[in-house]
Amino acid sequence: MSSLSHTEIWTAIDALAKRFDMSPSAMAKLAGLDPTSFNRSKRGDGDARPRWPSTESLAKVLEATGVGFSEFAALTERAPRPDPRPNPRAVPLIGFAQAGAEGLFDETGAPTGPEWDEIDFPGLGEESVYALEITGDALVPVFRDGDRILVSPTVPPRRGDRVVVRTAGGELLIKELARVTARSVELASLNRVDGGDGGDRTLDLAEVVWIARILWASQ
């Protein structure tokens, strides 16, 4: 193992997860590890002291997947190299269908908890962002099944922006911000055909826990 570099070890771990059509977090769970064990934030990329996976965690992953060490080492050559695009950064990711569960966001709308996966996203500054993956057709034609939206809980939303809204009742909504008054928030449906996303909504301010602005979508 000493002959492999820090980058090669982590590249092989990513390639192993990809071989079994899993995220690194899902592979960690399969091996009985903390799901965040292989997250980008745990690798120390760019730090003075890069962090390595433990021998124990690597052994558990190889046992769970049935892959020998020599085969694992060979993945360092066949795996895709790190994203060459400028300034890639790990961004928390979760499916929109799962994002309505309790404990996934703090009171400001920022992601929290171990259930989040991660993806690399290039060209980001220092703003706090996360990604949601759309499932189903309720938001067609604006967002389709499999689209990923990049969301900022810190960039102030403006009228006409597409937003994610958390209500005091536990709902997680994706709408267009139509109007904000001293007492209410008016939200416009993104599905103008059949209102499959629940249609237009007007919420009392007391019903709104947070509103986060959608910055970008993969389409």
Image (cartoon, rainbow, N blue to C red):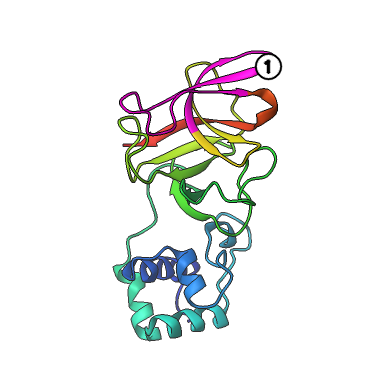
Q: Name the residue under label 1.
A: 183
Answer whether residue 191 is magenta in the image: yes
Viewer-proximal residue, 191 or 28?
191
Q: Does the magenta stretch include residue 168?
A: no
- Above or below residue 67? Residue 26 is above
Percent x, y of residue 134: 40, 43
- In the rendered view, tell whether residue 204 sits above or below residue 79: above
Residue density around tag 1, few if under 14, some if 14–19, many if 20 or more, within 10 Å: few
169 in relation to 120, above or below: above
Quadrant of res 64: bottom left
How many marks do you count on the picture? 1
Residue 29 is at least partly visible in this image:
yes
In this rendered view, identify the residue nearer to me: 132 or 165: 165
**In the figure, residue 121 lies in which quadrant?**
top left
Residue 123 visible in rendering: no
Which quadrant holds the C terminus? top left
Disc 1 residue type (three-letter): Arg
Q: Which x, y percent locates residue 207?
A: 66, 30
Give the left or right position of residue 81, taking residue 45 as reference.
left
Part of the protein shown in magenta: 174-203
Residue 83 in the figure: left or right of residue 212 = left
Left or right: residue 12 versus residue 37 is left
Placement of 53 over or under 118, stated as above or below: below
Element marked by disc 1: loop
Q: Position of residue 69 (x, y in %)?
A: 40, 85
Name the residue located 68 percent from the left edge and 37 percent from the top edge.
Answer: 108
Q: Position of residue 198 (x, y in %)?
A: 44, 32
**Residue at 55% across, 66% down:** 35
Q: Which residue is drawn at 46% across and 45% down?
A: 96
Taking the spot 63% from the left edge, 39% from the top edge, the residue there is 169
Q: For this rendering, which residue is in front, 163 or 1?
A: 163
